[in-house]
Image (cartoon, grey):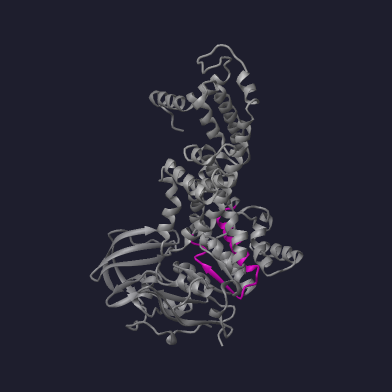
Amino acid sequence: MSRNGPVALVYHALFVTFMLAPIGVVCWVAFTPEGFLSFPTDRWSLRWFAAIARYPEFVSAFWRSLWLGALSSAIAVAVSVPAALAIARHRFPGREAFTALFMSPLMIPHIVLGIAFLRFFTQIGLGGTFTGLVLSHIVIVLPFALRLTLASAVGLDRAIEHAAVSLGASEWTVLKRITLPLVVPGLASGWALAFINSFDEVTMTVFIAAPGTETLPVRMFLYIQDNIDPLVTSVSACVIAVTVVALIAMDRAYGLERLLVGRGNHGGTHGR
Amino acid sequence: MAFLALDTLTKHFGSHVAVDRLTLKVEKGEFVSLLGPSGCGKTTTLQMIAGFVEPTSGGIRLEGRDLLAVKPAKRGLGIVFQSYALFPHMTVAENVSFGLEMQGVAAAERAKRVGETLDLVGLGAFAGRFPRQLSGGQQQRVALARALVIRPQILLLDEPLSNLDAKLREEMQIELRQIQRTVGTTTILVTHDQGEAMALSDRIVVMNHGRAEQIGPPHETYERPATPFVASFLGKTNLVSGATVRPERISFAAAGLAGTVRTRIFQGNHWLYQVDTADGLVTVIRQNTGEAMPGEGAAVRLAWRALPPQSSGEVSASSRTEGS
């Protein structure tokens, strides 16, 4: 075990504070009884949590964000599997171009995508629809899904599939019984990262969402444009609470490190 | 008619010739090793038999049938891969059972045969484990059981022991030989380890640059190497007075080539000497019989029996020595 010196400890403490302080402050402010963002506050109240009930659009936006993230991530992962297997195993003309195309949403500013999608969806009659939201979110989360799926597809020992073939398995059986089960950890990681990115997205979504199809971040963004009361902090605190509970549950069930790094459950050295 | 016949089998990768007109006949029940340094084409040959690599030209026949016309999944060959290639998400029993399942064997019969085969490789008690919970040697046995359980016409072994440590490798060699004798499956082993090839095989195919340099039983190939490459690849050789001599065939004698012992290394069952002579440095191996041996700096005289003179070129496949 190497030990950290005092300088390193101070540095780490500052770093962790820098990361966590804003979250802590938001949660603290959420408990203020005042009608504005007052910090620090020495009086406590659940007033702004109760206030959420008077704004059902926040609750429905939360569910919409959840569905949007789950659905667009699932579709992105489904698209990623054949793409990743093809890119990982075959050398074909246009391979580099395909990979670059799938990764390009990372490079394009979301505000540009937002304007482009707004124009495009209006043109084809999908403006302001949930379908439009899903389609646009598939595009922005695809790089995350593909990257992790690709990592597990590249790490797959071809000899394992050859072994299955030599034992008499058809191509379809190999895919179903061998290949897919072995890339599932990558798919789960890809889905999780894609979901987080979708749930978080506001820059592009604010152009595409219409009243009735607003996601939670968009709803919050629009709210603080017109209001200065601490409602958004209590909403934020709720989201943070849900996230923490979900992370703990996933860590218990599966192992967070494994989920987010995309390590398989058959690495051999990584026993739990 | 030979059981398995490779006929002028050739594989080009672009301009590189991986396997060059390899002709080989394997009898039923025979254990044949493809031996050579990396890049000699032995693994490519194995993969062509397995069906994972398409030959550029030439043919492969199994019991007279054209094997190249059969899909890899239908060839009915058992393969043990260098990496073992076990299915990591399945238990030992599920791994071994997989091939039987593909053949449509009923569950009760499957369980029986899986149990028998695991007992054969000494892993009866490990059926419920996952591969990651096994040692390298145990994983190796699972791979062997998985290949054998389908009662393959041919067992293909691709460097199966190269990931094991030296002691375990020796044990597995003996065990592998016993298992192969028990089940009697025709076996082709790919290896770069000449000791392994000699220990296990009925016949050895020494390969270099995609060609078979010599095909013959281990003892004969060792004693009568057809080419300088075979002589040097199958054990150590000295070139003294224009003759090729194995180090263990040189003895310290009253008369003979004069020399001085430069180094003497004790290796348990034998002594390894390096002797300075007028012909250059000569390696000598003497059995440790418990007698006193010349020390470093001692003046010695060397006598030997040389290997028979080699034919200058390579041997064609037709001039090979047939195994018994």
Residue furthest top as drawn: A42
* B178 left or right, relative to B293: right
Residue furthest left as drawn: B278
- Residue B93: % across, % down: 67, 58
Q: Is residue B161 rendered magenta in the image?
A: yes
Residue B5, visible in the rendered structure = no
- Residue A18: % across, % down: 44, 26
Residue placed most toward the observer, A21 or B115: A21
- Residue A10: % across, % down: 41, 23
Quarter occupied by residue B62: bottom right
**On the rendered image, what quadrant is the N terminus of chain B found in?**
bottom right
Q: Residue at x 59, y 35 (%)?
A: A247
Residue B200, visible in the rendered structure = yes
- Residue B73: % across, % down: 59, 71
Relative height, residue B57 to residue B281 (above, below):
below
Quarter occupied by residue A270: top right
Magenta-colored span: B134-162
* B239 left or right, relative to B120: left
Q: Is residue B87 rendered magenta in the image?
A: no
The image shows a total of numbered marks equal to 0
Q: Residue at x 65, y 55 (%)?
A: B91
Q: Residue at x 56, y 14 (%)?
A: A34
Relative height, residue A67 to residue B193 (above, below):
above
Residue furthest right as drawn: B108
Residue placed most toward the observer, A165 or A140: A140
Q: Residue at x 49, y 84 (%)?
A: B322
Residue placed most toward the observer, B68 or A267: B68
